[in-house]
Image (tube, rainbow, N blue to C red):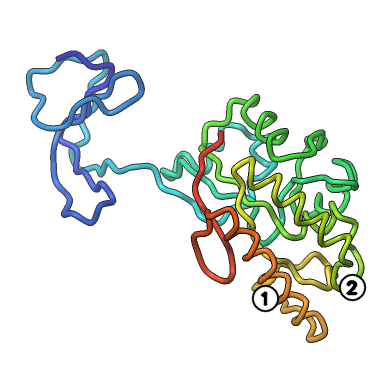
Amino acid sequence: MNFETLIRNATIVDGTGRMRFRTDVGLAGGRIAAMGSLVHAQAREVVDASGFVVAPGFIDMHTHSDVTLLDDPGGESKIHQGVTTEVVGNCAFSPFPAGDAGPAGLQQALGSILPSRVEWGWSTLDGWARCLEGQGTSLNVVPLVGHAALRVAAGALAESPPTPDQLRAMERLAGEALEQCARLHGPADESFKGLRGFGQQQAPPPRSLRATCAGRLHFLRMTLAYERVEASDVEWLTLPVIA
C-alpha cells in the first residue's frame, strides 16, 4: 500500500467513547485511507507519532471569528490547538443579515463587537460565506444568525419590543438565513441597549423580560416550522459546515 502520509505508532482517541488505542494511520487524498498495522506500507512522508495522540479535529462551539477570519484566513491560533471547526454568530451577534440597514449600517451597529479591517460588503449569509470561502479559510465554519443582527436589519433599535412590522421583517430575514443553512441564536436583550446578548452577565431590564421571552417563543415556533431545531431554550444550533 502507498500513502501520501503514514503516521506510525499513534495513540488514537477517536471521540466515540471507546478506550484509546495504538495503531498506524495512512492518509491519501487528504483523507484517512487506512488504519491498522501498516508496517509494510510506503509513503512520501512518514511521521513517528510515538507518545502523541491523534484525534479528530475539535469543534469550538462558542467563538466570535465571524469576520476576524477574513483578516486571518489561516486561523493558526486555533489550528495549532487542534480546532478545525468554529461555531460563529454567538451571543446574538452575526455579520448578517443586513436588511434595510445595509452592510454599512450593520457594521456600524455591530462593528465594535465584531471588529475587522474588512469593510462589510455583503447583505446575506450567502454573501458572507462567499467572501469567507474566497479567502481560503483553513477552518470549517458553522453560522448562527444573531437576534441582535435581526433587530438592526429590521430597524428595531429602540428600547422597546419590535413593532409588528419589524417582527415580520425579522422573521422574513431569519427565514432567509435558515434557508441558507444558518441557525437562530438569541434573542438578544430586547432593550437593545448596548446590544447585550440574552444570558450574558448583563441581564435584560425587567420591562424587557416579557418581550424577550415572547421573542424567544416566536422564533422557536418559527424554527420548529423548519423542522431543524436541536438544542436548549437559550440557543438553537445545527452543524452545517459551509466553509
Foreground pick, 197 / 76: 197
From what the image shows, is residue 233 above or below residue 87? below
On-image quarter of the C terminus: top right
| Disc 1 residue type (three-letter) | Gln
Q: Secondary structure at mark 2?
A: loop
- Give percent across and percent down for residue 195: 80, 64
Residue topped by disc 2? 159
- Give percent across and percent down for residue 191: 84, 73
Q: Secondary structure at mark 1?
A: loop
| Residue 136 falls in image quadrant | top right
For the view shown, which residue lies furthest in the front direction? 225
| Disc 2 residue type (three-letter) | Glu
Sequence-wise, the earlier of marks 1 and 2 is: 2
Image position of 182 (left or right of 148): left
Residue found at x 26% / y 18%: 45
Residue topped by disc 1? 201
Foreground pick, 168 / 231: 168
